[in-house]
Amino acid sequence: MPPTLIAYDPGKATGVALWRDGKLDPLTGEYDEAGVYRILDETCGMIDAAQVEFFTISSRTIKTAVDYHALHLIGAIKYAAFRCGYPVSFTNPADVKGRFPDAALRKAGLWNKSDHVRDATRHLLVPLVARGLFDAKALLL
C-alpha cells in the first residue's frame, strides 16, 4: 500500500494537500482553523508523514502585521504528528515555488484555484518526488 502523505500551507486560510492511494485525496482543500483541527483528527492513524511550510517571523512580517495563525497551527500539526506517530518536515516557500511553479502544477494535473492549496501541493511534491511516488518528469516544462 502506498504511503499517505499530507502537506500544509498554514495560515488564517490553510491549504491542505493529502496524497492517498497514489493521487490527491478529496480532502485536499482550503480550511479555516477549525477545519484544520478536524483534518488532523480525521487523518490520525492514516498519515505516514507530513510536510509543512516553514514560517519565519522576519522584519518584513513584523512591518506588514504578524499573523499568529500559522504559528498556532504549526504547533497543532506537530502535536497531532506526535500523538498519531508520524514525522513532520518543513520546507521554505521560496524553495518550492521556484521548483514547482504554477505552470508545472497545471501540466501535472495538480493545479488548484486556491493559492493556499497550490502552495500546500508544492510542499507535498517534495516528499512525493524524493520517495519516487510522483514522476518528476510530469512537472517539467
Image (spheres, helix red, strand yellow):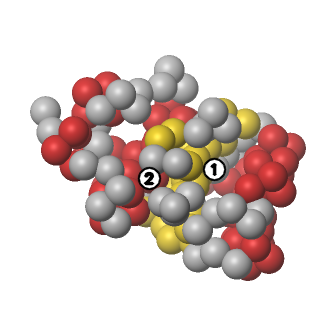
Q: How packed is label 1: few (under 14 Cα within 10 Å), some, or many (20 or more)?
A: many
Q: Give the amino acid type for the residue marked by disc 1 in the picture.
A: Pro
Q: How packed is label 2: few (under 14 Cα within 10 Å), some, or many (20 or more)?
A: many
The residue beneath circle 1 is 10
In the picture, which quadrant includes the C terminus? top left
The residue beneath circle 2 is 123
Q: Position of residue 101 (x, y in %)?
A: 28, 36
Of the two numbered discs 2 and 1 on the same chain, state the one appearing first in sequence.
Answer: 1
Residue drawn at the location 22% of the way across and 49% of the way down: 136
Q: 130 or 60: nearer the eye?
A: 130
Q: Residue furthest left?
A: 141
Residue drawn at the location 63% of the way across and 33% of the way down: 26
* Number of numbered discs visible in the structure rendering: 2
Q: Position of residue 61 (x, y in %)?
A: 55, 51
Check the image and report above or below for 34 versus 5: above
Q: Is residue 54 left or right of residue 126?
A: right
Q: Is residue 59 visible to us here?
A: no
Q: Quadrant of residue 46?
A: bottom right
Check the image and report above or below for 133 versus 17: below
Q: Secondary structure at mark 2?
A: helix
| Rendered image: mark on residue 135 | none
